[in-house]
Each structure stands twice: as C-alpha cells, then as structure tokens.
Amino acid sequence: MAGHSQFKNIMHRKGAQDAKRARMFTKLAREITVAAKTGLPDAAHNPRLRAAIAAARAAQMPKDNIERAMKKASGPDTENYEEMRYEGFGPGGVAIIVDALTDNRNRTASDVRSLFSKYGGNMGTSGSVAHQFDRVGLIVYSAKAGAPDTVFEAALDAGADDVALGDEVHEIYTSIEALHEVAKALEAKLGEPESAKLAWKPNITVTVTEDDAPQLMKLIDGLEDHDDVQTVTGNFEVPDEILEKLG
C-alpha cells in the first residue's frame, strides 16, 4: 500500500506540474498575441514581442505554439485583451501589484478581490501601493549565461542602472526608456535573455514573520495560478529559516 500511495503522490505532483506548465504557456501565448497586436507583428521591430518570444523560448514553449499565438493577433477570432493593474495588501501589510490581461475586467477584478480576502489581505484602490515600487526595465539571464563578474561588467558597459546577481538568475535593471537598448547591447555579449520587460521594483521592503508567511505564500500562489494574471510583485522578504519551515 505504501508503494501505491507513493505512486499516487508522484502522479498527483506530475499532474500539478503539467497543469502549471499549461497555464504558463497560456499566459505566454496571450502576451505574444497582445504584443503582436499592439505593435508590428515583426519581433525585430517590436521590442515587446521580441521579449515575449524570448520568455516563451526560455520556458521551452513549442515553436508551433509561439507561431500560433502570433497568427492569432491578426486572425478573425482574435480576443480583445485589456491590460489591467490591481493593487492591494497581503498579510503583514505586504504591498502587492497584480498585472493582468483579461477579456472580462469585471470577472478578473472580482476573482482577484476574492483571493485577497480569502488569504488575509485586501484589494486597494489604484495607486494605493504603487508608490512603494519603481517602474523599471528588467532583463533576466540564467546564471548559466556567464560568471557573475562577466555579467556585472557587461551590464555596466551596456548602461544598466543596477544588477542583482543570484545562484539561479541574474537580474539587470534599467530605466524604462533604456530597456531596449541595454537589452540589445547585452544580447551581443551574453546571448538572448530569459526575459526583457517592464517590471515593478520595490523601494520599501517588508520582512515577513513566521505567522504571516503561510497565508502570504498561499495568496501569491493563488494569484499566480489565475489564468488572467500575468505577473505578481510584492515588496516582501522571507527569511531563509522561515522558507525552510514552509518547505
């Protein structure tokens, strides 16, 4: 019975991973379609589309899916997606910004509000937490792209404003206006990035307590799992010892 139970657990985890991958592909495809529709359908002349395709490739999205998403932008059955931003507070007063692409703003707003309420937070009005973040350009490279010193020097030469080096990814920050040019200069030295896009960077950080961490993580997971939500950004830090306890 133990072996059977273990097999069921493995299959459940695999099913959850497959479902999460499918949701990710849906979101990437939606961004490609919107990028192709709002600008030129040529990645060479459309920075947003180029970044969307790069993110899809980094996620190992099949080439057919990418091409289908691009064609959908000019097809007869094109959905009209609206870019929406929701702001709110999570457990412990954490500020959260949710960016979404939706074809039904009332449904999405209701769902996001419900998730905030369910996990001990509350959705605020527009501008209620945005002042705790800076709008920046963000270029992400896998740590495999190069040694930390190499990436740092390349970012400095390219005109980046800040660099956060990590064990898994390197994050390079730019001004909004310089994003495309910095990304182009970096690509010549480090290759294609995992993503290059506008992002929110916290200018105030909240340290999460052990009591608030479980609910906050559930809120973040719930928001990220929603089909209409593209990105979730919070201004929090979770101490390593608490992360270990959360598993």
Image: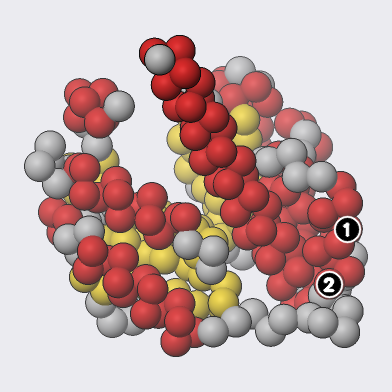
Badge 1, how many Cα within 10 Å: few under 14, some, many 20+? some
Residue 163 visible here: yes
The vertical placement of 180 against 237, above or below, is: below
Mark 2, residues whose alpha carbon is within 10 Å: few (<14), some, or many (≥20)? many
Q: Which three-letter amino acid code belongs to the residue tagged 1? A: Glu
Looking at this view, is 67 or 134 the one in front?
67
Percent position of residue 56, x then y: 72, 48
Q: Please report whichever mark, 1 or 2, sits nearer to the chain's N-terminal start.
A: 1
Residue lying at 31% horizontally and 74% vertically, measured from the top left: 113
Q: Mark 1 points at which residue?
A: 67
Compared across the picture, whether 97 is left or right of 176 comes to left
Picture residue at 30% right of the left edge, 55% below the top = 219
Question: How far from the left and from the top, in percent, is residue 42?
Answer: 89, 65
> Residue 51 versus residue 161: which sits nearer the camera?
51
Q: Quick one: SS at disc 1? A: helix
Which of the two residues, 5 or 137, is positioned nearer the viewer here?
5
For the residue pair 65 and 185, the one nearer the viewer reads as: 65
Give the residue at x 26% y 41%: 237
Up-down relation of residue 110 to residue 243 (above or below): below
Position of the C terminus by quadrant: top left
Marks 1 and 2: CB-CB under 8 Å?
no
Height in image: 206 above or below 28? Answer: above
Which quarter of the picture shows residue 52?
A: bottom right
Q: Distance between the residues labelled 1 and 2?
A: 9 Å
Image location of residue 7, percent across then percent down: 50, 21
| Total count of labels | 2
Q: What element carries label 2?
A: helix
Q: What residue type is labelled 2?
A: Lys
Residue at the image position 68 percent from the left and 26 percent from the top: 145
Q: Mark 2 points at which residue?
A: 72
Res 3 quadrant in image: top left
